Image (cartoon, helix red, strand yellow):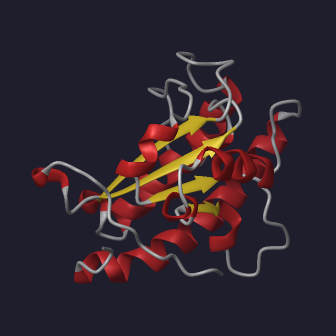
């Protein structure tokens, strides 16, 4: 597991204590919505949900405005999560200044985000989700889009494991107010 280096986000005074994370995949209808929802729920269960903002986006614009893939929503529901209100959007490089952490779901997303980052400080905010999973065998979360329902459950299990690792790493810092 790779430790997070926390960077200060530019935010309104009222929101300055919130830790902002954006999960990024290709079209923002499968993997990144899963991560957004799971992370938010796990942070709430850990008692730090009121100190984080979880969002998601895609590197591409193919699905902007669409709901999450029905198989994503179904997998989330089978595991006790609600992803029904999600609407896809494309990542905007201008968001780097207001985010503390940008979590890529695979190496292709990380390369794109690194390219979009305006300076090294923003590039340092980009991390692979599976880098937070203890003993991860791979750092890429596979894209389930062209697969079956079972693959969505497999991907969700990977996302849950990695998000649990991320929350475990963030929670002590958020409790102490030392994420910035």
From this viewpoint, which residue is outermost toward the front? 119
Q: Does residue 116 appear to the left or right of 87 in the view shown?
A: right
Query: Compared to 132, does 119 lie above or below?
Result: above
The quadrant of the picture occupied by the C terminus is bottom left
Query: Compared to 50, does 27 lie above or below?
Result: above
Look at the image and tell me whether residue 21 can be seen. Answer: yes
- Give 46 or 142, whichever is nearer the viewer: 142
Q: x, y percentage for residue 165?
A: 56, 74
Q: Quadrant of residue 141?
A: bottom right
From this viewpoint, which residue is outermost toward the right? 147
Look at the image and tell me whether residue 80 can be seen. Answer: no
Query: Compared to 5, does 78 lie above or below?
Result: above
The quadrant of the picture occupied by the N terminus is bottom right
Q: x, y percentage for residue 123?
A: 58, 60
Query: Compared to 71, does 123 lie above or below?
Result: below
Q: x, y percentage for residue 138?
A: 84, 67
Q: Does residue 110 appear to the left or right of 79 in the view shown?
A: right
Give the tally of numbered discs.
0
Q: Quadrant of residue 48?
A: bottom left
- Give 173 or 119, whichever is nearer the viewer: 119
Identified at 37% across, 65% down, the residue is 45
Q: x, y percentage for residue 143?
A: 81, 42
Identified at 89% across, 34% down, the residue is 147
Q: Does residue 38 appear to the left or right of 72 in the view shown?
A: left
Identified at 24% across, 58% down, the residue is 50
């Amino acid at each position: 597991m790779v430790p997070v280096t926390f960077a200060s986000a530019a935010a309104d005074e009222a929101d300055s204590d919130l830790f902002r994370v954006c999960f990024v995949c290709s079209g923002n209808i499968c993997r990144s919505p899963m991560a957004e929802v799971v992370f938010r729920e796990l942070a709430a269960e850990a008692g730090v949900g009121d100190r984080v903002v979880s969002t998601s986006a895609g590197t591409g614009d193919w699905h902007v405005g669409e709901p999450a893939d029905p198989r994503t929503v179904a997998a989330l529901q089978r595991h006790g999560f609600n992803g029904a209100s999600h609407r896809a959007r494309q990542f905007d490089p201008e968001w780097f200044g207001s985010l503390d952490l940008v979590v890529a779901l695979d190496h292709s997303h990380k390369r794109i985000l690194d390219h979009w980052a305006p300076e090294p400080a923003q590039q340092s905010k980009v991390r692979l989700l599976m880098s937070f999973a203890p003993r991860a065998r791979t750092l890429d979360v596979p894209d389930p889009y062209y697969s079956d329902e079972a693959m969505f459950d497999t991907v969700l299990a990977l996302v849950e494991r990695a998000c649990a690792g991320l929350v475990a790493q963030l929670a002590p810092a958020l409790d102490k107010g030392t994420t910035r």
